[in-house]
Amino acid sequence: MKKNVPANAASDREIVIVRVIDAPRERVWRAFADADEIAKWWGPYGFSDRTQEREFRPGGTWRHVMIGPDGAEYLNLARFEEIVEPERIVYTNGGGKKDGPGTHFRQTWEFKDLGEKTELTLRLVFDTRAERDFVVKEFGAIEGGRQTLTRLNAHATGAFALFRLVDAPRERVWRAWTRPEQLEKWFGPKGAQTKTLSTEMELKPGGVYHHGMRMDGREMWGRWTFREVDPPARLAWVNCFSDARGAITRHPMSPLWPLELLTTVTLQDFGPKTLIALFWEPLGANAEELKTFRDAAAGMRQGWGGTFEQLDAYLKEKE
Amino acid sequence: MVNSQEHSLDLAFGALAHPIRRGILARLSSGEASVAELAKPFRVSAPAITKHMRVLEDAGLLSRRKEGRRHRCRLEERRLKEAELWIERQRAFWNDRLDALERYLKEDAGRANANRRIR
C-alpha cells in the first residue's frame, strides 16, 4: 500500500452510488440489519439471496450466496468492520461466481436522515483500478448496485416487485406489451371468457390506453395513463379501474384498494432471453388504502405461511 | 348489502396480515377454544390477545358465545374462505399475467416458425 495518497486518489478505484429511499432512516436501517429482510431485496433484478451465516456486529461475518436469474451462484463472504446505528455500516467483501475469478472490496453504506426519506450512499473501494474496471465490465456492478437499491426502495415502501426470465428477445416482449391486439391476447383475467370492447392506445407519455372486457356477463373497464415510454427497455403507467367513458372508479371487489397504482416494467437482455422486472406501487393513496395495498403486497410476496394449508386440510377432512 | 360484505373482505385482509392473528385462526381451525387457551402459545399479554381477537371479530373471522361465565371462540370458516380466495387472486395477479405472456410468446414463436416453413 502506498502512503500519503491524497484523499481523492481513491476515486479511480471506487464505485459510488447515491439514492434517496422513500422511507424513514430507521426503516431502511432495519431492512439491512435484519437477516430475513435483507434476503428479500439483496442483489440485482431477478436475484435471490441465501444467508448461510450472519453476525451483525463489528468483527462478525456474513456469508451468503447470491443466485442469479439463470441459477448461477455467487458466493460472498463479508466481515463487518464498523456498525454505527443508524448511520453507517462498513465491511470488506470477498466473493465471485462459483469457479470464476474472485473480487475483493471494502463497502460503506451511509444512511442520511431526510425525515420521511433517507439518502443512501454506497461506496465500494477496490484495491486497484483494474479490479474496479473488471467488476464494472464483467458483473455490471454499477447497474447492479442501482437495481439493488431500487429493490430496497420497493421493499422499504411496501411496494410489490416481481422478476421473470422469459424466452424471447426484448423487442418481442415489448411488442407483446405495447400493441393492443397482442396485449389483449394475454393480459386478461385467468380462466375467464373475455371479449375486448375497446382498444385505443396512445403510446407516449401522457397517452391513454382505455380498455374494456366482458367477463361472466359483466363489463370491466380499465385505464392506463403512460408515464414513461422508452422502447424496448422501460414502460411505466398509472392504472386504475374506470367506467366505459374512462372516468376513474373504485376496484370492483375492494373499495379500500388504492384508486391509482403505478406499474413500472423494465426489460433487459439476459443472453437470448429477456429479464422482466415489474414494480407495483400505490400513488396518492390515503393511510387506509396504503395499508390495504401493503397487506396485499406482503401476502403476494410471502404467501400466508401454513395457515391456509392447515385450514384446507381441515376443511377437506370435514367434507 | 354487497358493499358492507366487500368492505369486511378488506378488513379480513388486514386482520390476516398479523402472525399472531393467523396463529389464533390456525388454532381455531382444530376446534373451539377459550380466550385463555388461545392466548397460551403466544408470549403476549391478555389485553393484547383481546385486541387481536377484536380485529378478527370485526373482520367476521371469529365469533364468540358465552358458556356459563366463559367465552368460547370459534372460527367463521365461510368468511375465511372468502378472504383466502381474495388474497389468492391478488397474490396471483401478476404471476398469472406473466404466465400468460410466456404462453403467448411461445405460441406466437411457434406460428412464426410454421409460416416460415410454408413459404
Image (spheres, rainbow, N blue to C red):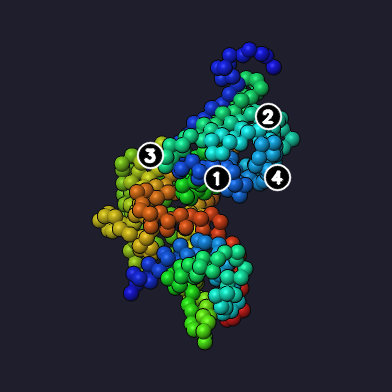
Packing grade of label 2 (10 A; few <14, some 14-19, many >=20) is some
Q: Earlier in the sequence, mark 2 or mark 4?
A: 4
Q: Earlier in the sequence, mark 3 or mark 4?
A: 4
Residue in view at x 47 percent, y 50 percent: A158
Chain ID of residue with mark 4: A
Q: Are marks 2 and 4 in contact (CB under 8 Å)?
A: no
Q: Residue furthest bottom?
A: B68
Marks 2 and 1, Cα distance to the nearest angstrom?
27 Å
B77 vs A228, left or right, is right
> What residue is shown with label 4?
A53
Vertical comparison of A308 with B31: above or below: above
Marks 4 and 1, Cα distance to the nearest angstrom?
18 Å
Pointer 2 and pointer 3 on the same chain: yes
Q: Which element carries disc 3, helix, strand or loop?
A: strand
Marks 1 and 3, Cα distance to the nearest angstrom?
32 Å
Q: Are marks 2 and 3 in contact (CB under 8 Å)?
A: no
Q: Residue furthest top?
A: A4
> Is residue A13 something that shows in the picture?
yes
> What residue is shown with label 1?
A30
Residue in view at x 39 percent, y 47 percent: A262
Q: Earlier in the sequence, mark 1 or mark 3?
A: 1
Q: Are marks 4 and 1 in contact (CB under 8 Å)?
A: no
* Mark 3 or 4: the one toward you: 4
Name the amino acid, label 2: Thr
Q: Residue B16: where, in percent of width, then height?
A: 50, 64
Residue A103, numbered circle: 2
Q: Earlier in the sequence, mark 2 or mark 1?
A: 1
Residue A228, numbered circle: 3
